[in-house]
Amino acid sequence: MEEIYLDPEDLQDDLDLTDDIEPVGEEAEAQMYEHFRVVADKGQKQLRIDKYLFDRLTNASRNRIQKAADNGCVMVNGKAVKSNYKVKPLDVITIVMDRPRYENEIIPEDIPIEVVYEDEYLMVVNKPPGLVVHPGHGNYTGTLVNALAWHLKDNPNYDANDPQVGLVHRIDKDTSGLLVIAKTPDAKTHLGAQFFNKTTKRRYRALVWGNIQEDEGTIVGSIARNPKDRMQMAVMADPEMGKHAVTHYRVVERLGYVTLVECILETGRTHQIRVHMKHIGHTLFNDERYGGHEILKGTHFSKYKQFVNNCFEICPRQALHAMTLGFIHPVTGEEMHFTAPLPDDMVQLTDRWRTYISNRDL
């Protein structure tokens, strides 16, 4: 995910339908635990609930969802439904199980973080690449949230396990850059509203494959989970099948077979920049999940292949950095604006390409 507002549809890290699901009997009803909840949009068209949930759950196959429904684990407006139930506008859909969610207490860990700004209401950090933002499957420790718990351990008003404070938005593990954290519930409410209403200002830098012909442009395409690869997101041919997404881009520097671009998020969907740039034929450099770790442009000469492989080693992740972040301070009303320069791996990467193009043109 590039950057997403933390709404209920995106908080599924503890939900796992890969385990066997036992039938739900009347005797067990009082001991059922809610694992997932979502409210259908006002404009939701009727759609089978197994398809609806398959599009929203990362770790569940459609067959597993159908089995969960057959066993009474899928509820709509408080009543169990079968997998052929048609979702209607404003339906409250929940998944229940006979065991509680994995509740992982956030333990403070002494992990260094770069604090760009801090006051009694919020803080802005510059996240390095490789650091997971929030605990989830396979990453229950060693995250930015654990680091924040340590940094704020002496603040009596900050509870790292309280969802009313903390991260307001997030970026991918291998994306570097700026994030804002709320220290108080009111600050999180106000900041969250700014992200939801698209009034924040967010600019990213990315190195992408290919020479983008236009100096600037806008990509509009609804994003949903790729039905052919559950680990990917994709632009949907039918705009009603995904979440509306808009990315503006501007060419910063042309470097032959790659281009350094600035991307401005109008919306904040999962993997938005990565998906939108791939959609227009310019996959992010070394983005393994979307095929950018292959040599997509250039020559067949062995020296060129070696050069690109060296570049992959210099920046062993998708070349994406959340460079600027702007918002209105939730208490003072001041307009805040922060910039984080490119991290060393992307600086070295772009320098290498400049040198290569310069020598090639001689």
Image (cartoon, helix red, strand yellow):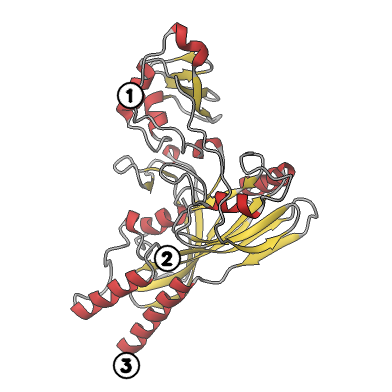
Kind of residue at badge 3: Leu
- Residue hosting label 1: 20
**Helix or strand or loop: what does disc 3 sit on?**
loop
x and y percent of residue 3 in the render?
A: 52, 52
Nearer mark to the viewer, of 3 and 2: 2
Viewer-nearest residue: 126 or 251: 126
* Mark 3 residue crowding within 10 angstroms, few (<14) / some (14–19) / many (20+): few
> Residue at 66% across / 39% down in the picture?
164
Q: In the figure, 218 relative to 209: above or below?
A: above
First of labels 3, 2 by sequence position: 2
Viewer-nearest residue: 250 or 53: 53
First of labels 1, 3 by sequence position: 1
State yes or no: discs 1 and 2 in contact (Cβ < 8 Å).
no
* Mark 2 residue crowding within 10 angstroms, few (<14) / some (14–19) / many (20+): many
Nearer mark to the viewer, of 1 and 3: 1
Kind of residue at badge 2: Ala
x and y percent of residue 108 in the render?
A: 58, 49
Mark 1–mark 3 distance (CA, rounded to whole Å): 64 Å
Q: Is 59 on the left-hand or right-hand side of 11? A: left
x and y percent of residue 129 in the render?
A: 47, 62
**Helix or strand or loop: what does disc 2 sit on?**
loop
Q: In which quarter of the image is the C terminus?
A: bottom left
Q: Is 311 on the left-hand or right-hand side of 3? A: left
- Residue hosting label 3: 362
> Residue at 51% across / 71% down in the picture?
342
Q: Residue 319 carries which label?
A: 2
First of labels 1, 2 by sequence position: 1
